[in-house]
Amino acid sequence: MGVGISLCVAALRKPLLEIIFGHAFLAAAPLLLVLVWCVPLDFLVSYFSVAYFAWGLERNVLISATIAASVNIMLNFSTIPRYGAMAAAVNTIVSYLIYLACLAWSAKRLRATANASVANKISHRDFLGFHCP
């Protein structure tokens, strides 16, 4: 669903920007083309986060979000002065990918080290079918 939304918004970004914000915002179309891909990434992050909350593993979500936010801030400080708003948009995508990677790594680590009751909750069918050996 997130990919479908992103494809529609990407295809219709110029008319949408003009209708919603007016002609003055058409220059934001390239930024929207990048940022729209945050939608499917946010769907995945939300799915993982809800699973972690259901299992009582909020701390893992907090650590993952903190790492992703820290990387985002560092990337923004280092790239926005030179590349502007497009750098911020790309940095946002990178940060979402880091967030997802941290959550996936956390699941793999939990399966390897957690006690049997938590490990059984995180089956290989969880996390959208990604197998965590």
Image (cartoon, grey):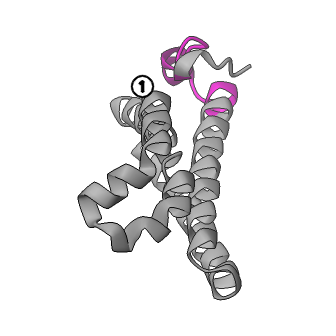
> Where is residue 18, by image quadrant?
bottom left
> Where is residue 70, by image quadrant?
bottom right
Does 86 appear in magenta?
no
> Where is residue 100, by image quadrant?
top right
Q: What stretch is highlighted in magenta?
A: 110-127
Residue at x 63% of width, y 81% of height: 80
- Among all residues in the image, which is located at the extreme left? 20
Q: Is residue 64 visible?
A: no
Residue at x 36% of width, y 74% of height: 24
Placement of the N terminus among the 4 image quadrants? top left
Residue at x 54% of width, y 23% of height: 127
Residue at x 65% of width, y 43% of height: 101
* Front position in the image: 22 or 80: 22
Please name the amino acid that badge 1 sits on.
Answer: Met
In x, y percent, where is residue 68? 58, 59
Q: Is the magenta stretch mostly helix, strand or loop?
A: helix
Q: Is residue 67 shown above or below 70?
A: above
Q: Is residue 107 shown above or below 79?
A: above
Q: Can residue 88 be seen in this view?
A: yes
Q: Is mark 1 on a helix, strand or loop?
A: loop
Residue with the mark numbered 1 = 1
